[in-house]
Image (cartoon, rainbow, N blue to C red):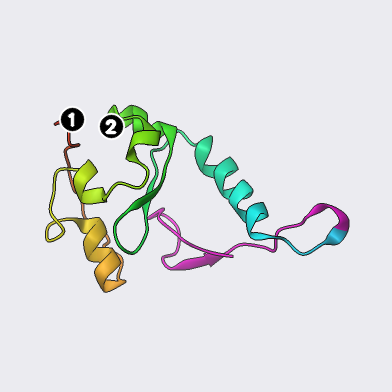
């Protein structure tokens, strides 16, 4: 499993995770990885939003909901540009999705669709 490293204090680039150990020695299924993913990010105090290549939000944890004052279930499936107040041209998320290149050392402030900064 490969994840992108977003902590600037660690080496940049993809990080390989060790193989997932599953009871009984069976090879891991996608649902096993999804369970691990949810354990890591659902318990996280840091807000996490993940969009698919088209910009639709596919993951939005409770911490992000508290920060944005939005209910996670109402955000899932929405375009990231509809949830946050920016267009596809000035959205760092959409730039990364279109170019495939990470943006480093850039602070970006945004507003939710309800005006929350």
Per the image, is 21 magenta? yes
Q: Which mark is residue 68?
A: 2
Left or right for 77, reference 27: left
- Counting from the top left corner in percent of width and height, residue 117 is at 17, 33
Going 45% across and 33% down the picture, which residue do you hit? 45
Residue ID at (27%, 65%):
96
What's the residue at 40%, 35% (across, down)? 73
Within the image, what quadrant is residue 55 found in?
bottom left
Question: Dot 2: what SS?
Answer: helix
Q: Residue at x 23, y 60 (%)?
A: 94
Kindly check if marks 1 and 2 are in contact, taking CB atoms under 8 A apart as contact: yes
Viewer can see residue 105: no
Magenta: predominant secondary structure element?
A: loop
Residue ID for mark 1? 116
Q: Which region shows up in magenta?
A: 1-24
* 90 shown above or below 84: below
Q: Position of residue 16 (x, y in %)?
A: 57, 66
Residue 91 vs 44, above or below: the answer is below
Q: Nearer the viewer, residue 93 or 52?
A: 52
């Amino acid at each position: 499993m490969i994840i992108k490293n977003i902590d600037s204090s660690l080496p940049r680039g993809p990080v390989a995770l060790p193989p997932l150990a599953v009871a009984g020695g069976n090879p891991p299924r996608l649902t096993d990885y999804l369970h691990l993913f949810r354990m890591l990010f659902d318990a996280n105090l840091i807000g996490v939003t993940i969009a698919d290549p088209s910009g639709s939000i596919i993951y939005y944890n409770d911490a992000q909901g508290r920060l944005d004052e939005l209910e996670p279930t109402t955000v899932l499936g929405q375009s990231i540009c509809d949830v946050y107040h920016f267009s596809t041209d000035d959205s760092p998320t959409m730039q990364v999705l279109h170019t495939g290149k990470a943006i480093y050392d850039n602070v970006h402030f945004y507003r939710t669709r309800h005006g929350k900064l």
